[in-house]
Amino acid sequence: MDKNSKVNQNKVTSKMSKRANLVMLFVFLGVACIVYNMINVQIVNYEEYKVKASSIQLRDTKISPKRGTIYDRNMKVLAQSATVWTVFVSPAESDEEQHARIAEKLEEILGADRERTLEKLKKTSSYYEIIEYKIDKPEADAIRQWCQEEEIDGVNLVEDYKRYYPYGSFAATILGFCGTDNQGLAGLESYYDEELTGVQGRVISAKNGWGLDMGYEYEELNAARNGYSLVTTIDETIQHFLEKRLSAKVEEYNVQCRGVGIVMNVKTGEIYAMSTKPDFDPNQPFEIYDEEVKAAIEAITDDAEYNNAVSQARQTQWRNKAVSDLYEPGSVFKIVTAASALDSGAATTHTGFYCKGYVEVGGWRIKCNQTSGHGPLTFEQALIQSCNPSFIDMGQRMGIQTFVDYFESFGMSEKTGIDLPGEQKSITYNAQTMNETSLASNSFGQTFKVTPIQMITAVATAVNGGNLVTPHLVSSLVDEDGNVVKDLTPEPKRQVISEEVSELICGMLLENGTNYNARWSYVPGYRVGGKSGTSQKLDTAMDDDYIASYVGVAPCDDPEIAILIFFDEPRTYSYYGGNLSGPVVGDLMGEILPYLGVEPVYTEAEKANVSQHVNYVTGQNVTDARVTLQRAGFNVKVVGSGNTVVSQFPLNSMKVQKGSIVVLYTDADTESVMVTVPDLTNKSASDAENIMRGLGLNVKFSGVSASGSDAVVISQAIPSGEKIPMGTVVEINLTTTTAFE
Amino acid sequence: MEQRKHRNRKFNIKSFFRFAEKGTNVDLPLLVITIILLGVGLIMLYSASYVKGLYERGDSLHYIKDQALYAAAGLGIMMFVSKWDYHIWRRYTLLILGITYILLVLVFFMPEINYANRWIFIPGGPTFQPSEIAKFTVILIFADWIQRFGTQKMRTFKYGLLPFLILLGSIAGLVIVEPHISATLIICAIGAIMMWIGGTNEKFFFLGVLLVVLAVVMAYFLNPAGLWDRAMSRITAWQNPESDLRGSGYQSYQSLLAIGSGGLFGLGLGNSRQKHLHLPEPQNDFIFAVICEELGFIGGMLVICLFLALLLRGMYIAFRAKDKFGAMLVVGVISQITIQAFLNIAVATNTIPNTGISLPFFSEGGTSLLMLLGEMGIVLSVSRYANLEKGE
């Protein structure tokens, strides 16, 4: 019993378990508090804690994509991004004892101010204090090497990109330029900014409590994709031809408001070259390149005025007049009126016109450029003579509705859609706003305003078989590996006139370009057609401000290219488009067409004048040499008494026209026979040639066709009085005494 | 096959390991809960500690290597102890008490760590905290006394309060001057719970509560050595950890960020970001934050439920124990585990102000894990004898 009671005494009592239950109740209450907190933190306020945690755990790094390259049509690089580096220090990761050396070295390599670097290094909790932006590879390499050799911590380099334009001031208004953040600010750089930029990458990397990156813990939110490259329709060679000629003439003609040139493939609308001169160097776009303007600006003392002037000067030099400027196209537009009249049936090639020197429309007397009147004219003559009354007649024959329909169909009332920023919308009439008077003035290209690109596109439409094309500069987007990402070649917009009419227009332009007014653009063998235009700038203060323009098309039997040259306010001996712009078109045609591989087809008359290489006769028997050269069509002049040709001039490598003199030297010790160059100014072409031949010199004509009786010498490549070897070819520039608009 | 049939009953290693042997089996659910806690604890410790090990010791296995060895040894000890009749411990109460006092004094002759003498260093061997041993000593002696005094005497002042207070006072007094506040707190809590369940008169408890209230009021009015102000600033930091990121709020804030960013399902095992040097003591005081971050609310709740299951099963065993001594041993051990787990998790979730307490079975600390598993061995032994009686 005793033992039993002892056992019972030792038994666990119910009171104990009751008390234990009370303790457990408290425990459960406590656990409920904990769970309540956990629900609050993990579920209710999860987002808030997640964001706060991320802010201390994660580092958001942006990876800038490489900007795409801009190529010409032959994949020559026109604009390119090169890797540069941004230098920054991470004071938190650096050793304080090295600070002085870091500051010293960065000053030595980068020229970064020592005191400022030290100041930045004092921010010991910072990981990112920028020292210098966009440093080049040599400096970056030097810093890297030094840090490695000296075991320096906390000096870092991150990659960045800088835009380079290898040709400098070349195609500047087309290419545009980039800002400091590599964003396109003008031209193609701006228009295709998104495509060129690519996609910025974002890497979220985890950092630990010490702020260091944990290389193995990261997440790439956006993969960076480098920008696409542009394959443009620009031909670097043709662009060079254009810029060289245009620049020279803008200077020579003292052009006030810059000159424009466009070279376009008439069938596809591809722009081979486009330039506005003077322009700028996209590598340093913010500099002012016009010396006079620059000097004027630097003289300004008022800050606001100064900034305003600088900004205006920049805007001016950046402006691509080919797409951003409006002008009255003048007589060039007559191509459109003529094509419309023929296509609508309002006139045929057999329609006759009569010009009495003026015509009265709606109470206004509109004069012809030839105030005495052209008299009776055929359709072709009307175009060639650029007779205003005849074109007014054509417009009246069509009537307002038909005229406007064609006008709009030629794209004169809409933007061309060229892939450049800042294309201006033309200012034109429509069927409602046009009246008799404006129909008359519109018919010969006045009282409305279009852009140069619109005008050349309309001309292209008139000569390419009647299709309105979309002028464009980029043919495709390619990725880094050269794969075509997107073909951007636009489709022709619409058929505007019939092929037959187009052919007729080509024929008239060729006739005009070969034998009549437009022969400034004449190039032997290449069938260059053209139409000049001169328009008075009615909205400027000066009465004598003109725009001299000229459109050339070649080869006219199957047109390939059109060239528009346009000088805004030339101040020289003439303001006529034919005189000023025509020869530029001709010179360019002479360079571009052979470059494009267009086969010359010579007329009989031209054949006689074709330049050819002088046969190589040095070392030959004099008699044999003479026979060889004469058979080839050269005149031979022998100097000396030897039997063998010791040397010849011109050399075999030179190209001269048939009939030129080749001098053969037969004595080893004979010096070249020197001739003094005469003054040929104002001599007619044939006189000049005869004089030179008489002296034993050869000539090469440029400018207008030498076949016209009115062709006179305007300049000569070698000035009079200079002594040159007999046989030398002297280039002689011709113009005509008759001025045509 | 033959050998199995004729096994040697006197010495058989296989039967030693056979816990569920009919007639002498330990409580299987408790064993399973313990092993799950230990397993999950080891996995989470590895996940929580490898970053710290790598950064600070150059070895990601630094913490887990020792812990795994101690866990293995601890399991062995647990099995071994569970085989013993738990009454054997009653014979050595005085010896154990003596050793405890010696160790608690010895600790003051050991080198300081963080201005505190908590550790005893065995040259060339492991380190341990005598306060861990003191907890067990309190449990053992209280259990012994509660059975020895019996229900009636336990209600008296002379038996039910005075000896308990003297023992608790002397041990807690030694621990608090180390100083080791949290261990003192735990020891006192264990003692109080055992006295309460052991049958100490409830009026002493009311009196105790009264004294505590009085002390708080006195602190408020007298503010000795700015104690009240310090306590208040601690509480402000507790209520809004973001307000004091440079001070005591920092740890709680980092812990909350870890728990919060875990969300419902967590970032996945091993994916904690806060353990990358943001969270202090991820292998110890704030391991629960890493669990919540990696395994989410679900994972955190799972761990809480495991501890609750341990508590419930422990109490179930306690009140089916053969005698009060066994019951009170179990109550003591389970109380210790529950209190520590509760306080640790409450700190991590900022339910209570910050104080450093490790999470049983999870936190890094070899010798304390050994102690814990040894104590679990005693609980299992109690369960075995309880079942044994029923079985017969």
Image (cartoon, rainbow, N blue to C red):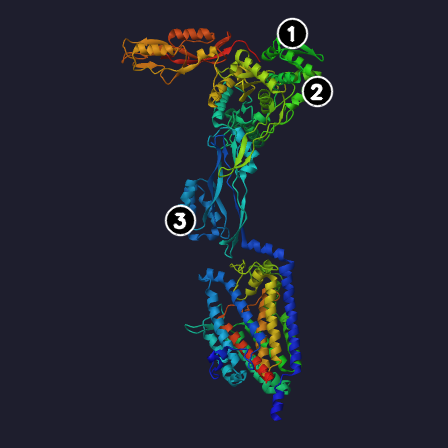
**Circle 3: residue type:** Gln
Left or right: where A597 falls relative to B343: left
Q: Is residue A625 above or below residue B52?
A: above
Separation of marks 2 and 3 at Cα, in angstroms: 79 Å
User: Which part of the image, by quadrant, shows the N terminus of chain A?
Assistant: bottom right
Q: Residues within 10 Å of mark 2 (few under 14, many from 20)?
A: some
User: Which part of the image, by quadrant, shows the C terminus of chain A?
Assistant: top right
Q: Which mark is residue A401?
A: 2
Q: Earlier in the sequence, mark 2 or mark 3?
A: 3
Residue under label 3: A148
**Circle 2: residue type:** Gln
In front: mark 3 or mark 1?
Answer: 1
In this view of the protein, can residue B105 be seen by the observer? yes
Separation of marks 3 and 1 at Cα, in angstroms: 89 Å
Discs 2, 3 touching: Cβ within 8 Å = no
| Chain where mark 2 sits | A
Separation of marks 2 and 1 at Cα, in angstroms: 27 Å
Residue under label 1: A356
| Chain where mark 3 sits | A
Q: Residues within 10 Å of mark 3 (few under 14, many from 20)?
A: few
Left or right: where A310 falls relative to A643: right
Q: Earlier in the sequence, mark 2 or mark 1?
A: 1
In front: mark 2 or mark 1?
Answer: 2
Name the secondary structure under disc 1.
Answer: loop
Between A232 and A64, which is closer to the camera in this rendering? A232
Tally of numbered tags? 3
